[in-house]
């Protein structure tokens, strides 16, 4: 599989640096493939943006990033951990 970083909504399914320069992120959401999957997102400076573990026994595993993360400019995006599923990033 490969990351798709064209258009307004990016689909990320592999780890690594997605972008190293600043960008405005409107929304992010993750569709883990199984309970217990982990995700960890950092900015280009190594600061944690969001990390989460999918909860066991959940029927709808779509996770939306709401709080404490807010839309705004991020100093790059580095997906450090993505155990399964896809991360979607809506940019403006």
Image (cartoon, helix red, strand yellow):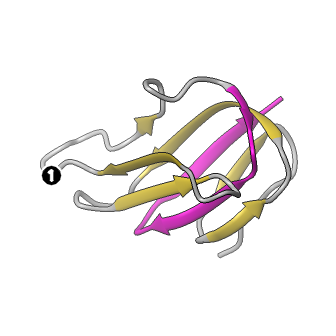
Q: Measuring from the top left, give residue 68's x and y in whole percent.
A: 44, 26
Residue at the limit of the structure toward the bottom, as seen here:
1
Residue 22 rendering spot, x and y as whole percentages: 83, 44
Residue 1 image position (x, y, % from top left): 65, 76
**Occupied quadrant, residue 79:** bottom right
Q: Is residue 88 left or right of residue 8?
A: left
The residue positioned 45% from the left and 49% from the top of the image is 31
Quarter where residue 71 is shown? top right
User: Foreground residue, 41 or 4?
Assistant: 41
Q: Is residue 84 magenta?
A: yes
What secondary structure prevails in the magenta region? strand
In the image, residue 33 lies in the stretch drawn in magenta: no
**Front residue of this view, candidates 78 and 14:** 78
- Give the left or right position of residue 1, taking residue 85 as reference: right
Q: Residue furthest left?
A: 57
Q: Tell me the magenta residue range.
A: 72-92
Q: Nearer the viewer, residue 80 or 48?
A: 48
Task: Find residue 32 and report its image quarter.
Answer: bottom left
What is the count of numbered marks?
1
Q: Does 82 sit above or below residue 42?
A: below
Q: Nearer the viewer, residue 55 or 46?
A: 46
Q: In what quadrant of the picture does the C terminus appear?
A: top right
Q: Residue 84: x and y, percent?
A: 42, 66
Label 1 SS: loop
Q: Residue at x 73, y 49 (%)?
A: 10
Is residue 85 toward the left or the right of residue 33 in the image? right
Q: Which residue is mark 1?
A: 56
- Determine crowd level at label 1: few under 14, some 14-19, many 20+ residues with C-alpha closer than 10 A: few
Position above or below: 73 against 55: above
Q: Is residue 41 above or below residue 62?
A: below
Residue at image location 65% in from the left, 71% down from the top: 16
């Amino acid at each position: 599989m490969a990351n798709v970083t064209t258009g307004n909504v990016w689909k990320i399914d592999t780890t690594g640096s997605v972008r190293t320069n600043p960008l405005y992120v409107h929304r992010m959401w993750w569709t883990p493939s199984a309970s217990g999957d982990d995700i960890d997102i950092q900015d280009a400076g190594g600061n944690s943006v969001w990390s989460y573990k999918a909860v066991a026994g959940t029927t709808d595993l779509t996770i939306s990033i709401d709080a404490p993360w807010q839309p705004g400019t991020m100093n790059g995006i580095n997906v450090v951990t993505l155990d399964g599923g896809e991360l979607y990033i809506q940019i403006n």
